[in-house]
Image: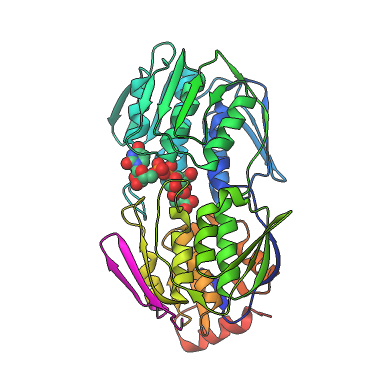
Amino acid sequence: MEKIIVHGGNKLNGTVKVSGAKNAVLPVIAASILAGRGTSHIYDVPSLADVYTMQEVLRNLNIDVDYTDGIFKVNAEKTLKTEAPFEYVRKMRASFLVMGPLLARVGKARIALPGGCAIGSRPIDQHLKGFEAMGAVVEIGNGFIEARIDGRLQGTKIYLDFPSVGATENIMMAAALAEGTTILENAAEEPEIVCLANYLNSMGAKVRGAGTGVIRIEGVDSLEGAEHTVIPDRIEAGTFMVAAAITGGNVLVEGAVSEHLRPLIAKMQEMDVQIIEEPTGLRIIGPEKLKAVDFKTMPHPGFPTDMQAQMMALLLRAEGTGVITETVFENRFMHVEEFRRMNGNIKIEGRSAIITGPNSLQGAEVASTDLRAGAALVIAGLVADGVTRVTELKHIDRGYVDLTGKLQGLGAKVERYNDTAETATPETNTAVEAKTNLV
Ligand SMILES: CC(=O)N[C@H]1[C@@H](OP(=O)(O)OP(=O)(O)OC[C@H]2O[C@@H](n3ccc(=O)[nH]c3=O)[C@H](O)[C@@H]2O)O[C@H](CO)[C@@H](O)[C@@H]1O
Ligand SMILES: C=C(OP(=O)(O)O)C(=O)O
């Protein structure tokens, strides 16, 4: 079994470079399907399991793709296939983002129905409501969602019940090739939406208002391949900011964009973390003592749910009581049980977690329950007494490029280790520790 093994106790110091954003690159790759002519070149594409899954989804649709040295090339000129099987959607829900582009480009898409996942049930009703409003017929059966339209989708006014990131992206992509203008209200305002809109516009689309609650998309007849650079990953940046702070370290997070990180910066400053804006990124200086704070996850520009687990690790080390309320996903506290295995004092009351600290964290064997939970457990391990072993790394690999290598570069005692022969005996555990050869 593969594990990340963390020896707690080292302060992080130095510089870490943020990779391109997972949540920006996946819709951008999906949007490439809209180009009837030309090859798209997408730059700063992170080497992540999700990117490889998206590559497979496109290949399966008869699209030419090449991913070398961080550059992703897509040519969708050939006759497209229209089905994305469960094999891909199960691995990564963002596979569902090919529905809008396929529907707009070829009038048909058949995508496996995404199941529930570790953080909640995650319905796609808002995506479907948008497609139906544009004239598509949507049918659900045999584990698939099929949407079709005779002729072109029709621009219209759509009001989302909730500012869903995925629904905003899927509808924006579909509307780019629709007949007439679509006005999307109560749209998501995340930086990844702006990144997608910029890419669509460089392909020839007419999208205005991305980054606000109202997006106006004037449909065009065709789109072409274009060049685009993906924004830096604000969640990866945030993860390193928290890692630096928890160890009382001094780290420059290169590529961190303060404009994308306002809610996190505000909360970390309230906790007495020093954050300095430098020309190339954000410098984080951890305090001797952290102060507890309360926060609620919300759609952007509220506090991001994707930073909730990492901030819980930080609160475990803070003095006083902090309350985290998760409002975006109904089941995103799976990491609480794992933190308890590390001696974390956390109570759950409904959708809130009450954390009383500071806790003396203890190394333990813990499992990543989702990708951010995995990173949060590694962060907790950095300040735990003894050795922490984090399992279920497939989650972490979906969203972090070389997490262990980047942490090692900052002086953390952390290593990825594969021991298929390992059993739970004390002898073999000692052997594992010896073999990890940590500095
Ligand atoms: C690949 C990607 O970009 N993933 C991000 C995206 O996920 P994703 O796009 O799936 O997140 P959404 O914003 O759509 O979901 C937010 C909430 O709305 C609900 N909902 C969503 C769509 C819908 O049709 N009906 C519905 O009820 C979801 O169940 C969830 O409770 O935004 C989330 C919220 O910031 C992040 O945590 C994910 O990292
Ligand atoms: C929940 C996340 O991603 P996804 O929507 O791809 O599952 C995440 O990035 O934290």
Left or right placement of residue 7 versus residue 91 in this view = right
Q: Is residue 174 above or below residue 249?
A: above
Rendered position, 182 above or below 436: above
- Side of 423 where 345 appears, left or right: left
Compared with 232, 206 (above or below) is: above
Question: Which residue is drawn at the image coordinates 52% and 75% (left, top)?
Answer: 381
Q: Is residue 72 visible?
A: yes
Q: Residue at x 46, y 41 (%)?
A: 94
Q: Residue 277's spot in the image, x, y percent?
A: 67, 57
In the rendered image, which quarter is residue 239 located in? Answer: bottom right
Q: Could you say which is closer to the camera, residue 110 or residue 25?
A: 25
| Magenta-colored stretch includes residue 322 | no
Residue 10 percent location from the top left of the image: 63, 79
- Magenta span has 354? yes
Q: Residue at x 47, y 65 (%)?
A: 311
The C terminus is located in which quarter?
Answer: bottom right
Residue placed farthest to the bottom in the image? 427
Q: Name the foreground residue: 165 vs 259.
A: 259
231 and 51: which is toward the camera: 231
Bounds of the magenta segment: 341-361
Residue 358 point in image, percent of width and height: 44, 80
Query: How far across and how far down the image is residue 228, in percent?
Result: 67, 34
Res 43 → quadrant:
top right
